[in-house]
Image: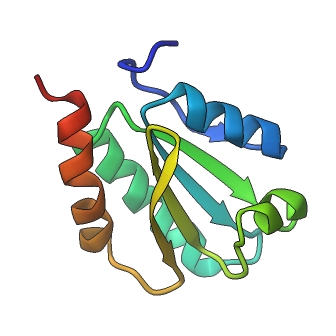
């Protein structure tokens, strides 16, 4: 898959997978969640809808913090949900617990369009 193609949701199972995807894709949203998180369950479909409608070339990765404690620890995630935006392999924004879809959209928009609009 090249950097211009849309990518489906990827469930991350180790640090190497997340590092690889952030290196390979120009835009990545990493979604750190937990199985008992009600907020995570409600917010995730809204995030997926936003990406599908506004940012289709952004890769979306889900990390279960309970199952993947090493990945969560490596990325300094201590609460769920936590979202980390990566552009060109670098973390650009981080949202934890209290955030709105509008804030997320604004954080993605400018850099995303610089990368993908011609």
Q: Residue at x 39, y 81 (%)?
A: 99
Name, please, the residue furthest toward the top: 1
> Is residue 82 shown above or below 109?
below
Percent x, y of residue 91: 50, 56
The picture places residue 28, in percent across and down from the top left corner, at 48, 43
Q: Is residue 101 above or below residue 49?
A: below
Residue at point 75% right, 36% down? Answer: 17
Report the residue at 58% width, 32% height from top: 23
Does residue 38 appear in the picture of this structure? yes
Answer whether residue 65 is visible to the viewer in this image: no
Residue at the left extreme, as displayed: 118
**Residue nearer the viewer, 65 or 71:** 71
Nearer to me, 104 or 114 = 114
Q: Is residue 105 left or right of residue 10?
A: left
Which quarter of the figure is the C terminus placed in?
A: top left
Q: Is residue 98 left or right of residue 72?
A: left
- Residue 84 vertical placement versus 5 (above, below): below
* Residue 82 place in picture, x, y as percent: 58, 71
Q: Does residue 92 appear to the left or right of 19 in the view shown?
A: left
| x and y, in percent, of residue 100 in the image | 33, 77
Viewer-proximal residue, 80 or 86?
A: 86
Q: How is the image coloured?
A: rainbow
Tally of marks: 0
């Amino acid at each position: 898959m090249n950097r211009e193609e849309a990518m489906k949701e990827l469930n991350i199972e180790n640090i190497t997978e997340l590092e690889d995807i952030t290196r390979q894709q120009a835009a990545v949203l990493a979604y750190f969640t937990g199985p008992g998180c009600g907020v995570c369950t409600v917010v995730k479909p809204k995030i997926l809808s936003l990406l599908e409608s506004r940012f289709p070339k952004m890769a979306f990765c889900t990390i279960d913090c309970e199952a993947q404690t090493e990945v969560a620890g490596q990325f300094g995630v201590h609460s769920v949900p936590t979202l980390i935006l990566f552009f060109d392999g670098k973390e650009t924004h981080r949202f934890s617990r209290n955030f709105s879809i509008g804030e997320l959209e604004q954080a993605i928009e400018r850099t995303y369009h610089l990368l993908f609009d011609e």
